[in-house]
Image: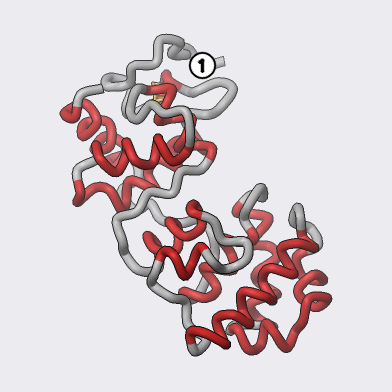
Amino acid sequence: MTLKEVERFITLLAEAHPNAESELEFVDDYTLLVAVVLSAQATDASVNRATRGLFRDAPDPAAMVALGEDGVGAHIRSIGLWRTKARNVITLSQTLLDRYDGRVPRDRAALEALPGVGRKTANVVMNVAFGDSTMAVDTHIFRIGNRTGLAPGKTTRAVEDQLVARIPAPLLRPAHHWLILHGRYVCKARRPECWRCPAQEPCQYTGKVLTPP
Ligand code: SF4
């Protein structure tokens, strides 16, 4: 895809999702960080069901540490990998208290040093909480990047680097949300719904599904 086609693709998604934002529920930087950590290999809807009670009982790092691993576990048991995630949430909350005065650091290296936080989670937090122009490549964005010609790459990092280099800077931050929603609801893994896709024209996928089932 040429740079002009990349811009056209993203602009068409923007027009389709003018108010796109994260589907995870959170109230501040800290609860966003915890929600994103919990969302690994889980749906946003399942995380939201668990965090409503969790954040009511533990809205900040000190309350979370006081709640303890068992207390966190009781809230998130319906989410995959809940034992490990409960441990990570307690350790990262203690780390925020010990090193950052209970705040979420605006620093990639510091974020990625927290338990349960990898590059993708750090990118989401930097994008949503701090307004940085980062691109968190999840399974949907990885698929779209390769399928459509938008940002081909063998690894999530390669796709991320391509997207950051090719999407015009003013569109980069919201593009994260537009692409995720597009992958979730239209450009689906098994059967993309190309017949109702707003970006059909610049998309280079050769197996487009143009008739509804
Ligand atoms: S035309 Fe189909 S494959 Fe291309 S972006 Fe749209 S849904 Fe995805």
- Please state which of residues 28 and 201 is positioned toward the viewer in this rendering: 28
Residue 13 position, x and y percent, is: 32, 37
Image quarter hosting the C terminus? top right
64 over 208 or under it: above or below: below
Under tag 1, what secondary structure?
loop
178 over 39 or under it: above or below: above
Residue where numbered disc 1 is placed: 212
Q: Residue at x 58, y 84 (%)?
A: 60
Q: Quadrant of residue 73?
A: bottom right
Query: Is 102 on the left-hand or right-hand side of 208?
Result: right
How many marks the image carries: the answer is 1
19 over 109 or under it: above or below: above
- Please state which of residues 20 and 33 is positioned toward the viewer in this rendering: 33
Residue 175 position, x and y percent, is: 33, 46
Q: Residue at x 46, y 74 (%)?
A: 29
- Please state which of residues 49 and 103 is positioned toward the viewer in this rendering: 103
Callout 1: few (<14), some (14-19), or many (20+) C-alpha neighbours within 10 Å? few
Quadrant where ligand 1 appears:
top left
